[in-house]
Image (tube, helix red, strand yellow):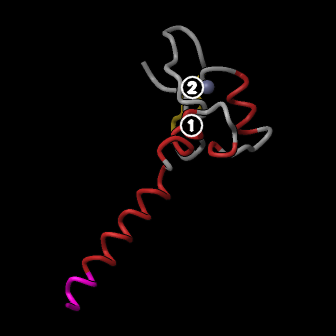
Amino acid sequence: MPKCVFCGKQIPRGTGKIFVYSNGKVVNFCSNKCEKNTFKLKRKLLRVKWTEAYRKEKTTGGMRAAKHKAEEAASQANQNAEE
Ligand SMILES: [Zn+2]
């Protein structure tokens, strides 16, 4: 089953909508709500509270936390090299 590109939910068979961009990119929407949030309201995934992306960002810290950890590890490696 495909996942909704906006809210991240699994889309039950026989429901939802497939949107094809003119450049050939294909995305799935579970509902009209998700489609409108993307195209009409032009909302960003990470700013809408009911999306999976937002929840992941809030609970695990998302990309920023991963980046921060990577930077920390890099700085520690540099310190070790200097000693
Ligand atoms: Zn959705």
Q: In which image quadrant can residue 34 be found?
A: top right
Q: Residue at x 60, y 43 (%)?
A: 22
x, y (%) of residue 14? 53, 8
Q: Is mark 1 within 8 Å of ligand 1?
A: no
- Element marked by disc 1: helix
* On screen, residue 79 above or below 24: below
| Disc nearest the viewer among 2 and 1 | 1
Q: Residue at x 58, y 11 (%)?
A: 15
Q: Quadrant of ligand 1?
A: top right
* On screen, residue 51 above or below 58: above
Question: From which residue to which does the magenta span run?
Answer: 78-83
Who is closer to the viewer here, 25 or 54? 54
Q: Would you say the magenta stretch is mainly helix, strand or loop?
A: helix
Q: Residue at x 73, y 39 (%)?
A: 39
x, y (%) of residue 73? 31, 69
x, y (%) of residue 37? 73, 35
Q: Which residue is mark 1?
A: 55
Residue, far front? 83
* On screen, residue 57 above or below 9: below
* On screen, residue 76 above or below 46: below
Residue type (three-letter) at the residue carrying disc 1: Arg
Q: Which residue is mark 2?
A: 18
Who is closer to the viewer here, 2 or 50? 50
